Amino acid sequence: DSDFYYAIQNLENFMSGSGNWSNATDNETIHQYIEDFAWRPLSIRHDYHGMNEYFAYVSESNIGKSFEKDGILFAAASNFEDTAAKGFIKRAKGFDTSLTGSELLYTAMGSQRVMIGNSVASFLKLQSLEDKFLLKFTKSWDGNSGFYKLFKSAGWYSLYPYYDLIDMSWANDILLSISSLPGHFPGIESVEDVWMWKVLIKLKPSVVGSEISYVKNKLGPYCNLIWDYNIFAKETDDSTTMLDLIFSMNTYMALFLCLFSLIASMSTNIIEQTKEIGIFRSMGLTKFEINKIYVYEALVLILSSSVIGMLIGSVLSFVVLQQQALFTNYPVDFYVPQSVIGACITGAIGTSILSVWFPLKRLNQKQIAQNMRESL
């Protein structure tokens, strides 16, 4: 209604510093902290947005109507991808253009196209973005009556923020432009009739924590809920750091358990080479130089076994992740934590030194002649 529209318009002016907020001082408005913002309308279904024609749900279907999948239709703002976090947008297939997917919807070509998830394109057996498919608007829940509209794809996405356009079998959201709604749905006469549900705000890079709190306080009276991505990202980073710490400690623990076996092995090896050590010392090698020989030997043994273990573990982890991605249709990135690699290297160095320190210390305390006699 008009009251809702004026409330939305007032909030938009408040965030952009225009309209009745154009002469506001810096301590009264927040536009100086906002780089961009994008509206997210309510889903296009039922009789929302004042549509004259009611439909219960929408489903995607191929031309032959042999494949059909229920979905939810949404409208996206042109600057949605510019406002959203770039790390959450992965396009599986799209046009070779500098425009983002949401911007492409507002071109002459994109006005008759929609954005869908990569899983939907696979389900409908689409081969290219020029392949046509149907959107079925069912008027009743029994599915007996409805109407069809023909569309092409503007892009297929394996990951997209705030909408289910991902590589999951249940992901079925469909995106079209807000400006195309009046042409598709009678009753929506202009963009002003669209019910805005959420707003995505992108702050300037220079904004600090106190200014973010100020923006939240100012937006409080307009919003039912404020979700801060920075807090979510911090919690995620803290969880990742904790997991890396746990895996690093597990690496140190594994090397510590191997230390006892390595000490026994190196002790036997050093005792068997007592005569050689005596000969090296009689030739002028210092105790430090002899210690280095055995430290290097232990280091080669530990590092080589650690590298082989990491390679085998990485291959197994990659296979498991690929199987998980195959069963869940969810994209999974594979990476080896640097903290684990660092823990493996530092632990190997420490273990190699400790494994030869005790047997060599006892052997170096003896005279050369005594070492030679004990080796006979």
Image (cartoon, helix red, strand yellow):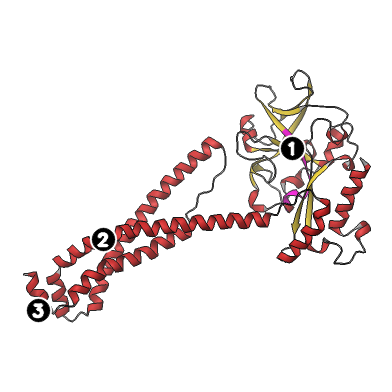
Give x and y (percent) for residue 292: 27, 73
Magenta stretch, residue numbers? 72-82
Per the image, label 3 sits on a secondary structure element best described as helix
Cα distance between the residues tagged 2 and 1: 63 Å
Q: Which mark is residue 114?
A: 1
- Is 367 situated above or below 337? below
Q: Secondary structure at mark 2?
A: helix
Q: Earlier in the sequence, mark 2 or mark 1?
A: 1
Question: Gap between marks 1 and 3, in whole Å?
Answer: 88 Å
- Going by the numbered disc 2, the residue's amino acid type is Leu
Q: Amino acid under label 3?
A: Ala
**Residue 127 in view (yes/no):** no
80 inside magenta stretch: yes
* Residue highlighted by disc 2: 262
Query: Which tag is nearer the camera, tag 1 or tag 3?
Result: 3
| Residue at 84% across, 37% down | 181
Mark 2 vs mark 1, foreground winner is 2
Residue 285: image quadrant is: bottom left
Q: CA distance from mark 2 to mark 3?
A: 28 Å
Quick one: SS at disc 1?
Answer: strand
Residue type at the position of mark 1: Val
Report whether 289 appears left or right of 111: left
Residue topped by disc 3: 369
